[in-house]
Image: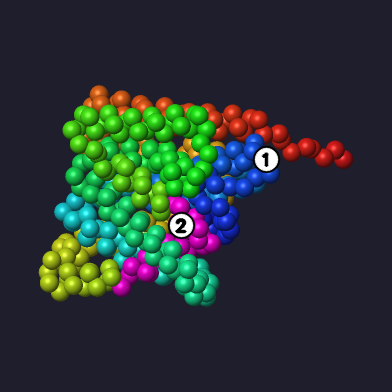
Amino acid sequence: MHSRYPAAANETPRDSPTFSNVIAHTEFMDRSTELADSNEIAAADLGEPVNVEARSAAVGADDRTGIALAAAAYGIWGIVPIYWRLLSAVPPFHLTVHRVFWCALFLAALTFVRRRGSHLLSLVRNRRLIGTLALTSVLISINWTIYIYCIATSQLVEASLGYYINPLISIALGVTLFGERMSRLRLVAVLLAASAVAVQAFDLGYLPWIAPALALSFGFYGYFRKRTDVDSLDGLAIETWILFPLTFGLVLFWARTGTGAFVGGTVLRDALLILGGPLTAVPLAMFAAGARRIRLSTLGFLQYLSPSITLLLAVFAFGEPFTRIDAITFGCVWLALLLVAAEGRFIRARIPSAPRIVR
């Protein structure tokens, strides 16, 4: 459920955190910039957190190629549960290990092709950067494992809910952990999201953990990832390389003891496991390329393609139940997202456009 994130390629992140903690000259402009940052952390796919830099070019016409690239990336992330279902015989933790392992190898080859080796070597000399990316590598691995677990246990509906509420969770984290201001509309939106979880908890008889866990791991990944001055693919490469010794050891151990999924199974399963590498990196590259060419508001709309496609897939293709309680829960979350979007349009409408130069 992406992965809300590595900075778009060749763009330099601001010094502010991913949450809406930005400095502006007036309170009015502060609120508009705050909205952009909250949209950044919302711009995520299912299990592939990606940060989208708010750019000065965010106002203007969208490039069609950019829309196509971003929509294709979100579309791939939306249907990727089909791929994981083909590997349903493999435990979720094993799948995460193989995903990191093959992604690290694929990105090593891609780094050579892109001639980014010297640049990445300069990055790994930064101990603070490596420390942050070590933390984000753990966070994204946790997120991936939970998401794959949802697919294996037919709980994809709740996983899609987790990525719908992620922007709202991020707003709440910004207020509680970083002392950010919250508008009345956002307060109502967060309360609606909390109500959705409460409704589910009352119906289930226990506190649902999947949706909050996905959203929280996604949110914290986005916060720490935003603090690193490194583009999407380079960041993902370093993250997977940090975990590579561990994943390589596990894959080798499982192969030697006959308890692993690789080599001991069918050729098709081995090929699918290897495919996890490019399937992780390629959509991310498409997304980064698309994000640089379109407005942030357009990207904010496209981001909901992934959970929407996944929700439809879960209900109509995989036969997961969508109960009345689910309808109430999703209704609360969708209403909350509409409130945040409406606030954003209102703020943008009040921002005076730059004066035209008459020649």
Which is nearer the eye, 312 or 275?
A: 312
Q: Is residue 224 magenta?
A: yes
Residue beneath label 2, please? 225
Q: Which mark is residue 76?
A: none
Q: Is residue 139 magenta?
A: no
Residue at the spot 50% in from the left edge and 58% down from the top edge: 227
> What span is in magenta?
222-245
- Residue at image location 28% in from the left, 48% down from the top: 147
The residue wearing badge 1 is 26
Image coords of residue 238 (percent x, y): 42, 67
> Is 60 situated above or below 140?
above
Q: Residue 25, can we see it?
A: yes
Label 2 CA crowd tier, 10 Å (few <14, some 14–19, many 20+): many
What amino acid is labelled 1 in the image?
Thr
183 in relation to 245, above or below: above
Q: Quadrant of residue 282?
A: bottom left
